[in-house]
Image (cartoon, rainbow, N blue to C red):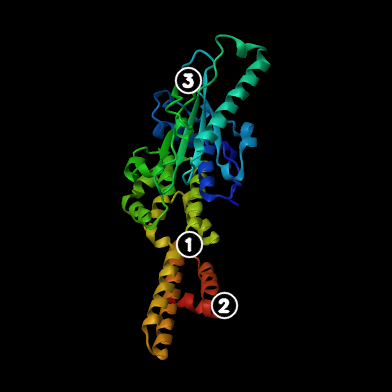
Amino acid sequence: MMKQINKKGGGHIVPNSQIRDSSSKIIFGDSHLCSQFLHGYVNIPILKNVEPEDIEDVSNRYVHMFTEERNSDVVKKVRLKGNETSFYLISLIEHKSRVDYNVIIQILRYIVYIWEDYEREQERKHKGISKTKDFKYPPVLPIVYYDGVADWNGGIKLEDRIYLSDVFEEYIPNFKCILVQLKDYSNEEIMEKKDELSIVMMISKLQKEADFAEFSRDINTEYLNDITSKSPEYLLDIIAQIVEILLMKINVPRDEAEAFSGKVKERHMGELFANFEAYDVQETRRIAREEARREVREEARREVREEAKKEIREEGIKKIVQVVKAIVNSQVSARQQLIEQYGLSEEEAEKKVELYW
C-alpha cells in the first residue's frame, strides 16, 4: 500500500490494486495537478483560467458507481470565473491504461447520473424548478486519459456504439469525449508546460525499454531541478509516489524503490535521473542470467562449463553490488540482495560487498 498524500493537495489513500490506475488517481485527485492538466491538455479557452481553488472533488457522490476495475474514476466540479449566473462545469476524468471499447457507455451513465443528481439538488432548494422553461443542466466534460502503448481505437463518440446510428442519426443522443493519448506527446512538448504535471507525464510514459532510452536522452536535469525547487512539499510527495510506482512496475525491490524515490523529496530530482538507465536492477539481473545460460550451453566440457558459470555468477554478484551502490548507497541492501539472489551466507555476502564496493 502506498503512503497517504497530504490532504493539503486534495489527495487521498489509493487502495486500487491496478498500479497504473493508481497513478492516474494521484494525478487527478490533486487540484493543483488537475488544473495544470486542464490548462495544458484540454483546448478549451474558458478552462485556461481555472485555478486549484476552483476545483472541487465530488467523486464520493458517485462512489456507488465505482468498481475495482473502475476505481480510478474521478469526478470534478469546476467553477468558472466571469459568469454572472451560478453556471458551473463538471469535468469527468476517465482513465484507461488499455483500450476499453465500452468506455463511451460508461461515461454516458456518469453524465445521466450527474444530471439527475443536479436536478434532485436543485429541486430540494426550489421545488418544481426543473420543470420551468429557464432551467438548465450543467455541461459535463468527458475526458478519456489514455496512457496505453497501442493506439486508442475504442471510439470517442456515442454513435460508435449504437447499431444503425447512421440510419437513426436524428433520433439518438450523441456526444464525443476528449481523448488525451499520452503517447501522442513527445518529451519536448511535455517539458514546454514547465510544471509539476510535466514530470509526472514523462514518468507515466515509461512503459518499454525504448521509452527509458528516449527519456534518458531527452531529459533536462536543470529543468527537473528548477521545477522541483519551487514545488510545495505535498507535490514532491506525489511525484515521489509516481517514481516509486514506476520502479515497482519494473520490479525494483520495494525498499530500494522507496530509497530511490526519497531523493525526490530531498529536491535532488535532476541528480536522480542523470544516469537514469543505470538503476534498472532487474534488467541487469536478467542479462547476467541469460549470459550464464548461453555460455553454459556453448561449453562442451563439464569443467569449462563450471568455470564459465562461476565467472558469470561472480560478474552478476559484482553488478548487483555496483548497481545497489549507485542507487541507494547501502551495503546492508547490497548484502541482502546477494543473499536472496545467489543464496550466499551472511559472511560470504559481506566479503563480496567489501570486494566490489
Is residue 177 shown to the viewer in this render?
no
Q: Position of residue 342 (x, y in %)?
A: 51, 76
Give the mark toward the camera: 3 or 1: 3
Q: Amino acid at mark 1?
A: Val
Q: What residue did someone put label 1 on?
A: 328
Left or right of residue 188, residue 143 in this image: right
Report the disc number at residue 294: none
Quadrant of res 294 = bottom left
**Residue 346: assigned label:** 2
Name the N-terminal-most of marks 3 and 2.
Answer: 3
Name the outermost residue toward the top: 133
Q: Quadrant of the C terminus?
A: bottom left
Say which of marks 3 and 2 sits in front.
3
Name the amino acid, label 2. Answer: Glu
Could you say where residue 120 lies in the image, as x and y percent from the top left? 65, 20
Mark 3 surroundings within 10 Å by alpha-carbon count, few (fewer than 14), some (14 through 19), many (20 or more): some
Kind of residue at badge 3: Lys
Q: Are marks 3 and 2 in contact (CB under 8 Å)?
A: no
**Residue on which disc 3 sits:** 81
When asked about the image quadrant of residue 314, the answer is bottom left
Is residue 50 in view? yes
